[in-house]
Amino acid sequence: METETKNQAKNEFNLDVAEMARAGLCFGHRSSQVHPKMKPYLQGVKNTIHIIDLEKTIEKFTEALKFIPELISEGRIILLVGTKIQIKDLVENIAKLCGLPYVTQRWLGGTFTNFEIIKKRVQHLKELEEKKEKGELEKYTKKEKIKINHELQKLKIKFEGIKNLNCLPDAVFVCDMKKDYLAVKEARGRGIKVIGIADTNVDPNLADYPIPASDDAISSVKYILEKVKEVILKAKSESLKSTKSQAPNSK
């Protein structure tokens, strides 16, 4: 009976070991690169590659998938971070579908620790965009317009994903905690919850909600982000229904 209840909890988000294995979540790095604190999440070694125990992945991923909709239901903010070239488009698309702020370019040091300065740069981006939209750039010379448009493009590359981030997020989801260690470090320093994919070469304790899985296989990251998208959209839909049901009937 206890085992049955445990399996039901695991399957709450339709997490399936076979499906996760096909998506490549189980393949870690070479055994020589393993982080000691990842050992409890490992099943063994195959051809010098560490294999992640997907039962453990389900357990930890379930915890994250329960935490994320709680944040969304409370109107809290999750920032999605994925700066690897091969997943940038995927991260941006998921973020836009879920209405999340995102970072897909290099993490700018001070994004959290010097947030007020970042906000000023974002405000400058918004002002330039507004001027361009209103046709106010036409009063400048051709050379000046080229310079302004060049600056605008650089600012958009850096800040487009956090343009509407008016305060520090409540949580950050990091797709590669090794590559974007600075994002994790800044988040922890500011008391921001960290949800992160923990491959075999990183310390899973860096995240409040680690997800033991490959962060290199695009299919692995896609599988994880699709599950995250599902719980976010469901939470948003339920919040909207709740708001409508509580609203007074209009005559």
Image (cartoon, helix red, strand yellow):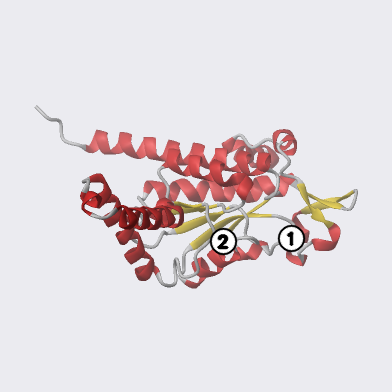
x 23%, y 37%: residue: 246
Q: Is residue 57 left or right of residue 34?
A: left
**Image coords of residue 206 (percent x, y):** 61, 65
Question: In front here: 7 or 190?
Answer: 190
Report which quarter residue 202 is drawn in: bottom right
Q: Could you tell me which residue is drawn at 26 percent across and 56 percent down? A: 127
Q: Which residue is mark 2?
A: 208
Q: Is residue 202 above or below residue 74?
A: below
Q: What's the residue at 22%, 46% (across, down)? A: 135
Mark 1 crowd level (few <14, some 14–19, many ≥20, 10 Å Cα): many
Image quarter (top left, top right, bottom left or bottom right) of the N terminus: top right
Label 1 sits on a secondary structure element that is loop
* 16 or 99, nearer to the observer: 99
Up the image or down, 173 lies above or below 91; here it is: below
Amino acid type, callout 1: Asn
Q: Position of residue 231 (x, y in %)?
A: 49, 40
Q: Give, as a three-letter code, the residue at label 2.
A: Asp
Q: Earlier in the sequence, mark 1 or mark 2?
A: 1
Name which residue lies at 68% across and 64% down.
Answer: 203
Give the vertical position of 246 relative to 155 (above or below). Answer: above
Give the secondary structure at mark 2: loop
Give how far across and how far down residue 141 sits, in percent.
27, 55
CA distance separating discs 1 and 2: 17 Å
Taking the image as shown, residue 188 lies to the left or right of residue 41, namely left
